[in-house]
């Protein structure tokens, strides 16, 4: 057998925020190699896999030497001689070895780096690009991208409360066209900020720094940017928001610091609904806090027939949480972040559960990223429908978008853009905004 694991090792390297992260290397008996880098979130859900950090003064406490030592020691010993082609078995061993529900002992960062590196090694042993290894002969769709134009929340010093203001181009014919349109919107947004004397660099995921007087001002500016790029908001280009509401939900109230306004859950749902009426919004992620399930259900009831309602912090790429939410009628789409799950197998299970519920699925990067582009292949191989990797700037983002272009080219005549079909089934296509 050529796919026996003969060594697993790790090192501390640096992510897109200049923070330490784990890189794992896997070598197989037949000589194939796999390498992967753990991403890291800043606005994390309470129930996701926990990264192991060294703490103390060094590197602001973000060091990962303990996590690296766990890979080089316990994990390497447990995986030695196992078959890399059996991803579920390998991931099961990692999870069992850890023994906690959230991988806190070995570190979610250690576990996901190894899990991904094993997958890369197995694909290399087959001599296939990762997406082909994963799609097993099927020709999957190319994703509808969600691309950030303004970054906010935890990724921009909480300059505004909304975390991501993104655009989607579901009517494009190809990924290439969706990118070309988005690039025009991104540049137009920068120009408008500059003209208004508000240009102040970019946030963690490459979106423009949100120098706005209110959250709604950011929404208005995004509509203007779409128009300035020569596109029709709500027809050619739509808005997608990640509210990341857990970040500003305290003592039972939603506190929009930029607006100096506070809401009880009921009135916050109303506020979100009013934005969905006034602006051409097609998707809203985490419109309510992770434990405010009634507000998540209510938002889905009010908007779910025409707006994608995505669970991120609420669902944390967990199959059981997705199934429970679907039963309650909360959300119609799941964000899939591999490091929330901690292993590739667990992330895939969450994605499959969401598909069974006829939800949309979005494979997502984290705000702390690297040159690792594996998630693009995961997306394509798993036929997830949508992909979210941040803005249209900064190489840790562009490396991923560019890889998608290469895959589109490689598919040739077989390439099919998911477009509207990447969104939840039955979403009515009514132009929103200004209604
Ligand atoms: P994070 O944010 O990677 O900082 O958690 C991304 C998101 O909330 O979608
Ligand atoms: Zn989110």
Image: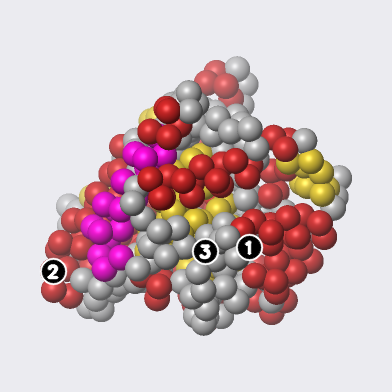
Q: Position of residue 129 (x, y in %)?
A: 20, 60
Q: Quadrant of residue 25?
A: top left
Q: Which residue is mark 2?
A: 412
Distance (Cα) linking label 1 and label 2: 39 Å
Q: Is residue 368 left or right of residue 416?
A: right
Q: Nearer the viewer, mark 1 or mark 2?
A: 1
Give SS at disc 2: helix
Point out the frontmost of discs 2 and 3: 3
Magenta region, residue range: 172-190
- Quadrant for the N terminus, please: bottom left
Neighbour class for label 2 at 10 Å: few (<14), some, many (≥20)? Answer: few
What secondary structure is the magenta-colored segment mainly?
helix
Q: Position of residue 73 (x, y in %)?
A: 45, 41
Residue bearing mark 3: 282
Q: Which residue matches tag 1?
A: 277
Residue 232 visible from this viewpoint: yes
Mark nearer the viewer, 3 or 1: 1
């Amino acid at each position: 057998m050529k796919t026996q694991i003969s060594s697993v090792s790790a090192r501390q390297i640096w992510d897109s925020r200049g923070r330490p992260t784990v890189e794992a290397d896997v070598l197989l008996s037949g000589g194939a190699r796999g390498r992967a880098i753990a991403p890291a979130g800043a606005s994390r859900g309470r129930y996701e896999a926990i990264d192991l950090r060294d703490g103390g003064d060094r590197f602001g406490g973000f060091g990962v030497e303990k996590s690296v030592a766990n890979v080089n020691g316990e994990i390497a010993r447990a995986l030695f001689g196992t078959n890399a082609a059996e991803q579920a078995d390998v991931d099961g061993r990692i999870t069992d070895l850890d023994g906690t529900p959230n991988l806190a002992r070995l570190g979610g960062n250690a576990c996901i780096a190894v899990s991904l590196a094993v997958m890369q090694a197995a694909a290399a042993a087959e001599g296939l690009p990762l997406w082909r290894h994963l799609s097993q002969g099927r020709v999957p769709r190319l994703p509808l991208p969600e691309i950030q134009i303004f970054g906010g929340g935890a990724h921009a010093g909480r300059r505004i409360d909304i975390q991501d203001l993104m655009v989607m181009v579901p009517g494009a014919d190809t990924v290439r066209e969706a990118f070309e349109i988005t690039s025009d919107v991104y540049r137009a947004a920068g120009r408008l900020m500059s003209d208004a004397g508000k240009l102040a660099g970019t946030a963690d995921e490459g979106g423009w720094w949100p120098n706005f007087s209110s959250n709604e001002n950011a929404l208005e500016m995004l509509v203007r940017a779409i128009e300035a790029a020569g596109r029709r908001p709500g027809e050619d280009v739509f808005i997608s928001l990640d509210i990341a509401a857990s970040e500003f939900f305290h003592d039972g109230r939603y506190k929009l610091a930029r607006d100096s306004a506070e809401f009880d859950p009921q009135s916050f749902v109303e506020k979100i609904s009013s934005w969905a009426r006034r602006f051409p919004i097609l998707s809203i992620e985490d419109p309510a806090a992770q434990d405010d399930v009634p507000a998540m259900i209510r938002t889905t009831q009010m908007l779910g027939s025409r707006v994608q309602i995505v669970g991120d912090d609420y669902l944390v790429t967990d199959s059981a949480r997705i199934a429970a939410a679907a039963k309650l009628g909360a959300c119609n789409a799941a964000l899939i972040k591999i490091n929330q799950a901690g292993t590739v197998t667990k992330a895939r299970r969450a994605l499959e559960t969401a598909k069974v519920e006829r939800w949309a699925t979005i494979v997502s990067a984290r705000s702390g990223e690297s040159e690792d582009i594996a998630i693009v292949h995961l997306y394509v191989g798993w036929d997830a429908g949508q992909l979210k990797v941040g803005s249209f700037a900064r190489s840790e983002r562009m490396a991923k978008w560019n890889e998608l272009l290469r895959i589109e080219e490689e598919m040739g005549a077989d390439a099919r853009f998911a477009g509207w079909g990447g969104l939840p089934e039955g979403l009515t296509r009514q132009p929103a905004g200004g209604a």
